[in-house]
Amino acid sequence: MSLIDARPFVGRHCESTTLVNLLRQRGIDLSEPLVFGLGSGLSFGYWHTKKMPTPFIGGRIKPDRLTANVANSLGLRLTVRETSSLKRAREQLVAELDSGTVVGLKLDRFHLDYSTDRYRFAAHYVACIGHEDDRFALVETRPLGLQWASGDALARARGARGPMSSRNLSFTIDHPGGSLPDLGDIARQSIRATAEDFLNPPISNFGFRGMRRAADLMPGWMDNLESPEEALIEISTIMEDGGTGGGLFRMMWADFLAEAAELTGVPEFRELSDAYRVVSRKWTDVAELLREAGTASSRGPVDHAAKLVRELAEEERQLMRRLMEHSR
């Protein structure tokens, strides 16, 4: 069959790229930063359990929440399907594609034919826009773009287990009709919600408290991790190149704030956009220091990175307070 969309959108982050493609099919053409921002996508999280050989540093909200937030904010109908049956998962996907519907999939790219990933991450998203014989057309982020995966590989990827995984999760979006809510109002609400969550995290692993916790633990990584050199390079890759748009999602957030300034008429959002561009570059510096530490097996860059993260915790705390003030 022909592709549902011959020229799909290829963006920077997997879930927001998938959402842009699903929204465009419904006649809703929004930029990727705007989708990320309207979904209150920015956050910070630090996670490390005994079953995880490598600590995880994330710069966005939990998987699946971005999609749910965007659908709820725009008044759209989100249909989510999960099943433990590989056969049923495939049948549901093929039926949606044959009806002309773009489908969002959550999976682990490690298992796909074209993947060169060295680590496993079961909360990756793609938009599926067609199938032919036993191959499925998937929209990835830059630089991969449109890729084809075999049915067997796709089944393994969708059924992968691990932190943040789901059971063959797929989702579609429908527009029930009528006009969209005012985007300026939604932007204000999403900025306020993002700031509130960042400033008042439910546990100490998230928000600015999570940054402080990560900064406190980072100096011990060279001694406490099983393979610190490999782990540090992996953390750096995920932070900077793992679909974050650079700077641990802060650059995408900065782009959103610039759009929000136009939508709301609040000039302070543009000033804060510029401030977050500076913050983004500092997070890039942190990732580069961790990579340097892993490559050279050196403790000094890790200590430097920890110092920067501690400073960033306070800097972002102040920026979120300003965003809270101007989003009222």
Image: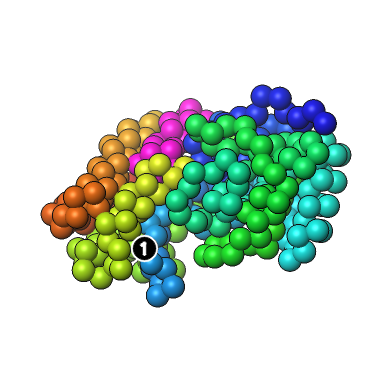
Which is nearer the eye, 25 or 275?
25
Q: Position of residue 299 (x, y in %)?
A: 15, 58
At 57% from the left and 40% from the top, the residue drawn is 114
Q: Nearer the viewer, residue 228 or 267?
A: 228
Q: How far across and down, in percent of the image, does residue 30 sit?
A: 60, 31
Residue type at mark 1? Answer: Pro
Instruction: Name the residue at the left extreme.
Output: 300
Left or right of residue 160: residue 191:
left
| Marker count (numbered) | 1
Q: Quadrant of residue 279?
A: top left
* Residue 62 visible to the viewer: yes
| Residue 291 rendering spot, x and y as whole percentages | 27, 48
Q: Residue under circle 1?
A: 55
Residue farthest to the bottom, as pictured:
50
The coloring applied to the image is rainbow
Q: What is the crowding at mark 1: few (fewer than 14 residues within 10 Å), some, or many (at least 20)?
A: some
Which portion, as a residue range, is magenta? Answer: 244-265
Residue 264 counted in the magenta span: yes
Q: Residue at x 44, y 73 (%)?
A: 51
Predominant secondary structure, magenta span: helix
Identify whether 238 is placed above or below 272.
below
Whether 294 is among the magenta residues is no
In the visual, does 24 lie left or right of 118?
Answer: right
Q: Nearer the viewer, residue 315 or 9?
A: 9
Secondary structure category for the residue under label 1? loop
For the N terminus, the image quarter is top right
Identify the residue at horizontal 36%, vertical 63% (top origin): 55
Q: Quadrant of residue 149?
A: top right
**Residue depicted at 66% across the width and 37% down the height:** 148
